Amino acid sequence: MRVPINLASDPLENLRPLRAAVAVAALAALVLGGVIATREWRSRSEFRSLIQQQADVEQRLRALETEQKQLEEALSTEQARRVRERSAFLNSLILRKSLSWTRLFMDLEKTLPARARITAIHPRLSADEEVSLNLTVLAPGIEPLVEFLKNLESSAAFGAPIVGSQRNLSERSAEAGVELELTTRYVQDRSGNLPASAQEESAAAEERIAAATGKER
């Protein structure tokens, strides 16, 4: 009978599992390093792209600022000022031609209290081609003026009034009472026909108002 005897100083060990674990760990570290390197490269690429976009935006902004300065310089010239004045004058002519003063007076008469009267009317044409009226109203007290403001708010022809200055006129002046300045939007209804008497007086009324507003300018 033979008995196995190990004469080596160190017993033989099985290192295959350890080597396999080391290989797996090395492979995992390699994969992890590759993922980290890829993310780092993408981050740097995105950062460079953002910097380039910011530089492009700043360049466009400087170009727009330069263009704005050029436009402001062009609009500040004497020729541009004359063009703006001529445009405002033509708009006023269009407004006066298209606005029926008789219809306007009829609409105001429906909203104006008996103890109040309008002393000045200034029609304006806004940039969006809406008609606004600057009115100066005189009344012996504040109550008719408050009633007039309420009537304007409830009227379909006028918008909500914007109250401006208010002052009390002295009894020693020609017209005593409370004077109020306000602005309101006006939408003229052209669907209905004016009465015959109103049509006959329309031209004369328009001439009187045009002359009055021209003098007040």
Image (cartoon, rainbow, N blue to C red):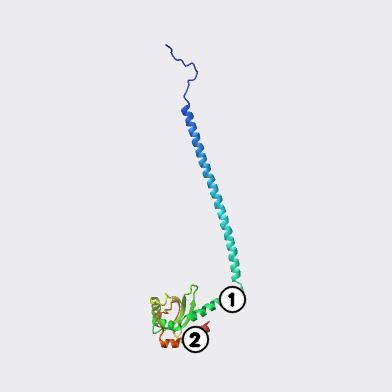
Q: Secondary structure at mark 2?
A: helix
Q: Earlier in the sequence, mark 1 or mark 2?
A: 1
- The image quarter containing residue 188 is bottom left
Location of the N terminus (image quadrant): top left
Q: Secondary structure at mark 1?
A: helix
Q: Which residue is mark 2?
A: 207
Residue 64 against residue 211 in the figure, above or below: above
Amino acid type of the residue tagged 2 in the rendering: Glu
What residue do we see at 60% from left, 67% from top? Answer: 70
Task: Residue 82: give its label.
Answer: 1
Residue 197 at what x, y percent from top left?
A: 41, 88
Q: Please count the marks in the image.
A: 2
Q: Nearer the viewer, residue 62 or 92?
A: 92
- The image quarter containing residue 176 is bottom left
Q: Nearer the viewer, residue 2 or 9?
A: 2
Outermost top residue = 1
Residue 65 at what x, y percent from top left?
A: 58, 63
